[in-house]
Image (cartoon, rainbow, N blue to C red):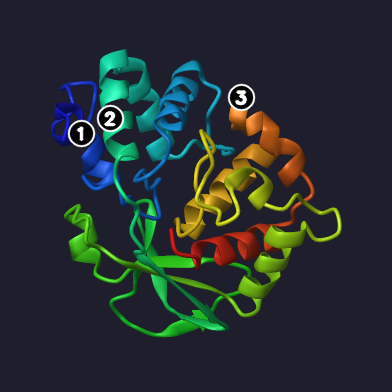
Amino acid sequence: MPDVVAHGRPPDVRACGSCHRTEGTGGPENASLAGLPAAYIAQQMADYKSGARKFAGPPQRGPVLLMTAIAKAASDADIQAAAAYFSSLKPRSVIRVVETDTVPATHIARVFYMLSKDGGTEPIGERIIEVPDDAAQFEHRDTRSTFTAYVPKGSIAKGEALAKTGGAGITTPCAICHGPDLKGAASVPGIAGRSPSYLVRQIYDIQQHARAGSGSVLMVPVVEKLSQDDMISLAAYVSSLKP
């Protein structure tokens, strides 16, 4: 494990593993990095540094502001070492996608959902509710943390149809760029089995032109017609696949 992943380079470069976990598993509040192409990871750092990758707020999300600051402070050697390390890791299935009309009551714990200590349930509505199965384990940066993503009923099948056919012109079949199994191709990232919360944010950010890097620009015509329901459905389906 490179030193920048384990320890960072204080005071300005935080350890990559402190947020993305040392095995690149990440969480709902950020990206899982395991198995992403090294060139793609390096390009995202360049986009953060140049301002081409932002959040479609306002306000800007804390993790995005943090990544921007780290990208500006990180050396080329730091970025190349981290990118090579995370790209060498095999992604693992850590998310269970559950279709439901009713979800456990939750509250926001900084930048992710946590189950309410008082229990109870509430309608899911037009939302994805993604929670760590063991909040304390997740907060302690344990790479063995697993998650349950609650999605509206019927969303997986709808998302599969959109992903495979494009929905009669609503979008483009995902496999054209992301590979037949959606596990990536060349410098295009794999999306199968990744956080649905993260995926929806990225689709929305690209649609709103908050992500304007070279790869994101190619995605604009793919996502420009998607509704919020379409985004949720696509993310539900993609996240239900094995990475």
| Mark earlier in primary sequence (2, 1) | 1
Q: Is residue 89 left or right of residue 10?
A: right
Name above or below for residue 57 compared with residue 159.
above
Image location of residue 183, percent across then percent down: 50, 51
Say which residue label 1 marks: 5
**Residue on which disc 3 sits:** 214
Query: Looking at the picture, does residue 242 appear above or below residue 33?
Result: below
Please tell me which residue is depicted at 19% across the width and 27% down the height of the picture: 4
Do the CB atoms of the residues marked 2 and 3 lie less than 8 Å apart? no
Residue 55 lies, in percent from the top left, at: 53, 36
Residue 151 horizontal/vertical position (percent): 55, 72
Q: Tag count in the figure?
A: 3
- The image quadrant of residue 96 is bottom left
**Residue at 47% across, 68% down:** 129
Q: Can the viewer see residue 217 in this picture?
A: yes
- Nearer-N-terminus badge (3/1): 1
Q: Nearer the viewer, residue 130 or 159?
A: 159
Q: CA distance from mark 3 to mark 1?
A: 26 Å
Distance between mark 2 and mark 3 Cα atoms: 21 Å
What residue type is disc 1 on? Val
Name the image quarter holding the N terminus.
top left
Q: CA distance from mark 2 to mark 1?
A: 6 Å
Identified at 20% across, 33% down, the residue is: 5
Q: Position of residue 65 (x, y in %)?
A: 41, 31
Q: Nearer the viewer, residue 75 or 67?
A: 75
Disc 2 and disc 1 in contact, CB within 8 angstroms: yes
Residue 117 location, quadrant: bottom left
